[in-house]
Each structure stands twice: as C-alpha cells, then as structure tokens.
Image: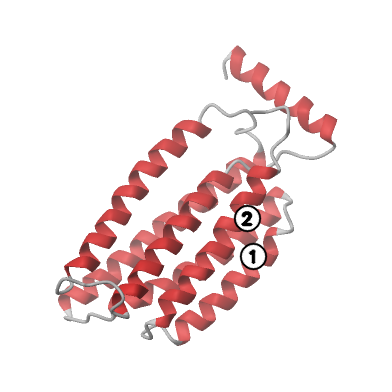
Amino acid sequence: MTRDELASDLAYVRAMAEEGRHAPLLGGSHFLFWGVLNAATYLLHWALLEGLIPTGGGAAFAFLWAGYGMIAAIGMTTLRGRISDKPGKSSLGVRAERAIWAGVSIAIVAIALGCIARMVVENDPLAPNNIMAPVLALFGAALMATAMLARENWLNLFAMIAYAFALVVGAFANAAWAYLVAAAANFIVLAIPGFILLRRKPAAIV
C-alpha cells in the first residue's frame, strides 16, 4: 500500500467514524449497472417474444444479446477503473463482496454456456429459458452472504425477494411473461440495493 493510499484510507475511516458507522460496500454502482442492464435486456427479449418488436427471423435475438455482451464488457471496464482508486477497498466487507460476486459471475457464465450448448447440440430453442431462475437464486445467495459478512442486514430482504422470484421464474420458465417477471426481479434485487448503497457512502468521500 502506498503512502497516498494509506492517507486516503485513513481519511475514509475518519469520515465513517464521524458519521458513526462501519465501512459501506463499494459495489453499489455495479449493482445498479447490472440491475438496469439485465432488466432492460429481459424486457426487450419479452417484447420480441410477444411480437411487439420485429424479430427479423430471429436475428433480433442475436443482436440483442450480442449488444448486451458489448455493453456489459464496456460497463465493467469503466466501473473497475472508477472503483480501483476508491478508499476503503481493503476493508473486510468490500473484499468479501468482491470475492462473492466474482464467484457468482463465474457460475452464471457456466450456466449460460451450458444452456447455449444444449440449444445448439440438442436443437432446443427453449434451453436459454433455464438461465433466469438459477441466476436469480445465485443473486439471492450472494446478497445473503454479503449481508452477513459486511453487516448489511437489510440486504437479506432483497435476498428473500430474489429467491421468491427464482421460484416463480423457474416454475414458468418457458412462458413469455417469465422474461417480464425476470426483468422486474433484476431491477428490484440489484438496481434498488445498488442505489441504496451509493446513497450510503460517507459524505466526506466523493
């Protein structure tokens, strides 16, 4: 740790002490980004399924998810750059948050690749529908673990909501409206906590 980083962390700890609370999590911007991106993509997917947007013989689905991947890559690169120089990133809660969500990200990629492989190998166009429910369940598990390790117990409420949505979406995964429910779920369990986390940062730290 450099002298500048140490001074920044000391200023951060002092700001928190003056406000009477422990180190807040720094993943609020990530939560908000993924919540809005996922919700918007699921909403557009639902609109395509319902014929509200021309599918172009199915090409629109490919463009939608290719665009999702590009936006996700650009967004994550930008967010990592913004957080890398933030004070407080060495706290236990922040390190646990980073590790938990890194594991969840790997799990989601594995699930998505497995479903896509089934779609190609078995010629099963409904296979990608099986991504939504386990992903929501993983969000719930990650939120619960983060709540415990970072002492942010209010996140448990959103974990329970994620589990409930996972149950509904899993039971009706092949229904078009399941994508609409998944859109609402992602906004509620990611974007809303992300906004709250951003609001909870110490006022003295920009």
Instruction: Kindly state the secondary structure of the residue where label 1 is placed.
Output: helix
Residue 202, percent across and down? 73, 34
Say what amino acid the circle numbered 1 marks: Phe
Q: Is residue 60 above or below residue 150?
A: below
Give the label on residue 92, or none.
none
For label 1, the residue is: 158
Q: Which residue is mark 2?
A: 193
Give the Cα separation between the discs numbered 1 and 2: 8 Å
Q: Image point 58% across, 29% down: which residue?
A: 86
Q: On screen, 122 above or below 3?
A: below
**Nearest to the observer: residue 100 or residue 169:** 169
Rendering quarter of residue 64: bottom left
| Placement of the N terminus among the 4 image quadrants | top right
In the rendered structure, the answer to whether residue 5 lies left or right of residue 61 reads right
Q: In the image, is 186 to the left or to the right of 203?
A: left
Task: Tell whether 137 sits left or right of 115.
Answer: right
- Determine whether the residue tagged by mark 2 lies in a helix, strand or loop: helix
Q: Nearer the viewer, residue 31 or 110?
A: 31
Q: Tell me which corner region of the image, top left, top right, bottom left or bottom right, holds residue 118.
A: bottom left
Dots 1 and 2: beta carbons under 8 Å?
yes
Mark 2 neighbour class, 10 Å CA radius: few under 14, some 14 to 19, many 20 or more: many
Q: Residue at x 23, y 80 (%)?
A: 125
Where is residue 161 shown, x and y percent of the image?
62, 71
Mark 2 is on which residue type?
A: Pro
Above or below residue 118? Residue 25 is above
- Residue at the (84%, 30%) spot, across then down: 18
Residue in front for this viewpoint, 141 or 82: 82
The x, y position of residue 190, in whole percent, is 55, 58
Residue drawn at x 69%, y 38% as measured from the top left: 201
Q: Quadrant of the C terminus?
A: top right
